[in-house]
Amino acid sequence: MCDKHNGNCFEYVDSGMPRVALNCVVNREEIHTTVDPTMTLLQFLTTGLKLFGTKEGCGEGECGACTIIMNGKTVNSCIVLAVEAEGADILTVEGLGKDNEISILQQEFIAHDALQCGFCTPGMLMSARELLDRNPDPSDEEIKEALAGNFCRCTGYFPIIDAVKAAAKREREELK
Ligand code: FES
Ligand code: FES
């Protein structure tokens, strides 16, 4: 890790191979660019688009720190190539809130002290978002299942589950 990239240091080295066109939508904004074909989606989002909210933990698809939502499904962006996002609709933690306000889910994570160092939090939030989008009233078991791929080393999982439940309740109430 280095201290220049908000805890992320991907040491991305361009392969020198011919660049490939990439057209996608990230956090509701159209992106039209070219990328190194060896660049991961995580590297593209962070070093490319300067969206440093998404974290790199293991870099091997195991810890969930790099979770984003692509075409409505969570993916570990460290094991997806940027070129695989051609035509995709991507949501990162930076896109959860709107109009300069953090989302209900983020508010409930804060209210329930569901983070300490916060390194796992962006990935947790994205997995929780995907869950609530397909299941607005999840049980504890369903929340645990949705977050099973996201590891937290410091907070413990109970406050996170409570935060997701509280956010689900508030979101349902807002829809009434
Ligand atoms: S950094 Fe991608 S799963 Fe761990
Ligand atoms: S809050 Fe530190 S790893 Fe989860």
Image: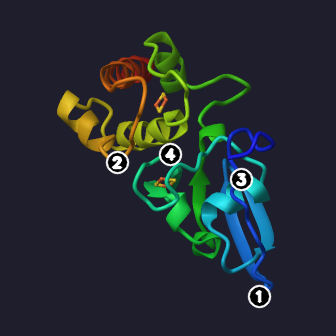
On the picture, is 162 further left or further right than 79? left
Q: Are marks 3 and 2 in contact (CB under 8 Å)?
A: no
SS type, badge 4: loop
Mark 1 or 3 closer to N-term?
1
From the viewer's perspective, tell me whether residue 166 is left or right of residue 1: left
Could you tell me residue 40's position as x and y percent?
A: 62, 67
Task: Give percent across and percent down for residue 77.
Answer: 54, 59
* Residue annotated with mark 1: 17
Which element carries disc 2, helix, strand or loop? loop
Q: What residue did someone put label 4 on? A: 65
**Label 4 packing within 10 angstroms: few (<14), some (14-19), many (20+):** many
Amino acid carrying mark 1 in the image: Met
- Label 2 crowd (10 A; few <14 / some 14-19 / many >=20): some
Which residue has dot 2 on it? 149
Image: 16 above or below 99: below
Instruction: Give the CA distance from mark 2 to mark 4.
Output: 9 Å
Q: Which element is circle 3 on?
A: helix
Residue identifier under label 3 = 46
**Amino acid type, label 2:** Gly
